[in-house]
Image: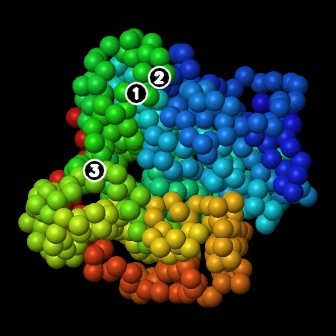
Amino acid sequence: MTESGPVAGIDGAARVFKGIPYAAPPVGELRWRAPQPLEAWREPRDAGEFGIDPLQAPAPWLRGAGIGEDCLTLSVWTPVAAETGSLPVMVWFYGGGFTLGSSSDLRSDGAALARRGVVVVAINYRLGVAGWLAHPGLSAGSTESASGNYGLLDQIAALGWVKRNIAAFGGDPERVTAFGVSAGAACISLLLTSPLAEGLFQQAILQSPGSLRRLATLAEAERGAVRVFGDDPVALRRAPPQALLESARLFGAPFADLDAPRLLRPIVDGWALQGDEEEAWRQGSARALPMLIGSNVEEGAFFLGALPARTLAGYRAWVGRNFGAMADEALALYPVEDDAAVAVQWTRLFGDHQFNRCVRRIAALNALREPRTFRYLFAQRPGARTAPPTHADEVEFVFGTPNATRTNADRKVSDAMLGAWVSFATHGDPNGAGLPRWPAYEGEADGYLEFGDSIQPGSRWRARELTFLERHFEAQRRVSPQRGESLRA
């Protein structure tokens, strides 16, 4: 029984309840509004199939009933013998660059985790133009005088649903771990700075968060939307879903300027997010929680298709534009001598800039106030392939989904990660589960546990490069201070 009515799921090795709505469908007049309450129902609602996947291009790993805007549902996997309110809860936030992803993704099926004694919840949130559009016409019609961040508000609403309802599925609403990858992990970090999310989860697992970038202000995001759509909010609300999907590409290429704020993603709106994320972490106003955080060996290789330069000259010019007076130092750390080396060094620089630097920085800042902070490095090459693991390769290992069992080595690493993630959700500490000792993170030691051919502790991974990037970001901050105070400028 949920607060809105009864649901009927599927029995198996773990019980699963799919496609449970947690808010009213965000369609018609509810498009680009904060999530609204559901209408209740009396008869048992069939929860045997996933709901509609958020608006995006179709993909073979999505299992939803279709693709569209009516997507505010979640799914729950729970052990068969779970007693009311007794078990730790893990709430999954998918990645996909704020434009892709779904709780139905085959790679993040919660059954294997649930069989180990946790309740798993996978939530949907709005994506792309449907999820992140800020526009002056939408802001004017809002009680908060703000727009954008609808995907973030969806996440907050889903976490509220978990707090109010999860005991009926066997979960303890006071032992909730939010975990996610990429954009999902970045959202969790942002939620730690949001007053609207306080008390909704007690622990966090951040897998390759693309965090700590300067966020666009509401005014910047609104100007970007007017350039694309004009200033008529009535026409905007009447646009068909396919037009919204196709318009996302008009908001600009994402990687030409590494440090510029990006649109169609979370912004500083003065309501859900009241200031820039890194400043909140620096000042200690972000909520420090028990945290497990890490990244993969070659994060940037996943984004090779967005390579902005393919020649030596083009690469050097791109580094010059992005690093200015520090360009020579960047070229020394990420050296290219001919065209053939451009892709390798760009992916390393991009991965360090977007992900690895964020992991080390958040770990260090969180550990200052919360000793239960643990860092990992994922080094396992899935399926014995020759290339190192790239962005999001660890997801199927964490969930124990089929691709993670291709070799004996894969099975070993997947079993270890399943055990560690469940241990952390249960105790706030990933140790146990047959692992070598995993030391808590300390900035000076800069330690981590590596999951690869060997599962072993290490320290100071890519320290020279990440220290350089810290200095680069600090220089950027001095030149262009965070602007959380001037939200309505």
Viewer-closest of 133 and 369: 133
Q: Which residue matches tag 3?
A: 255
Q: Is residue 174 visible?
A: no
Compared with residue 240, is residue 18 higher up or lower down, i.e. above or below? below
Instruction: Identify the element where label 2 is drawn.
Output: helix
Query: Three-letter amino acid code at disc 3?
Result: Phe
Q: Which residue matches tag 2?
A: 242
Compared with residue 93, is residue 429 higher up or lower down, i.e. above or below? below
Q: Could you say where residue 90 lies in the image, as x and y percent from the top left?
A: 68, 57
N-term mark: 3 or 2: 2
Give the CA distance from mark 3 to mark 1.
19 Å
Q: Could you say where residue 24 lies in the image, as x and y percent from the top left?
A: 64, 26
Residue drawn 48% across and 47% down?
A: 96
Residue drawn 86% across and 37% down?
A: 8
Q: Which residue matches tag 1?
A: 246
Q: Could you say where residue 51 lies in the image, as x and y percent from the top left?
A: 69, 33
CB under 8 Å between callouts 3 and 1?
no
Q: Could you say where residue 110 lies in the image, as x and y percent from the top left?
A: 72, 55
Place residue 38 in its image quadrant. Answer: top right
Instruction: Identify the element where label 1 is drawn.
Output: helix
Crowdedness of circle 2 by 10 Å Cα count: few (<14), some, many (20+)? Answer: few
CB under 8 Å between callouts 1 and 2?
yes
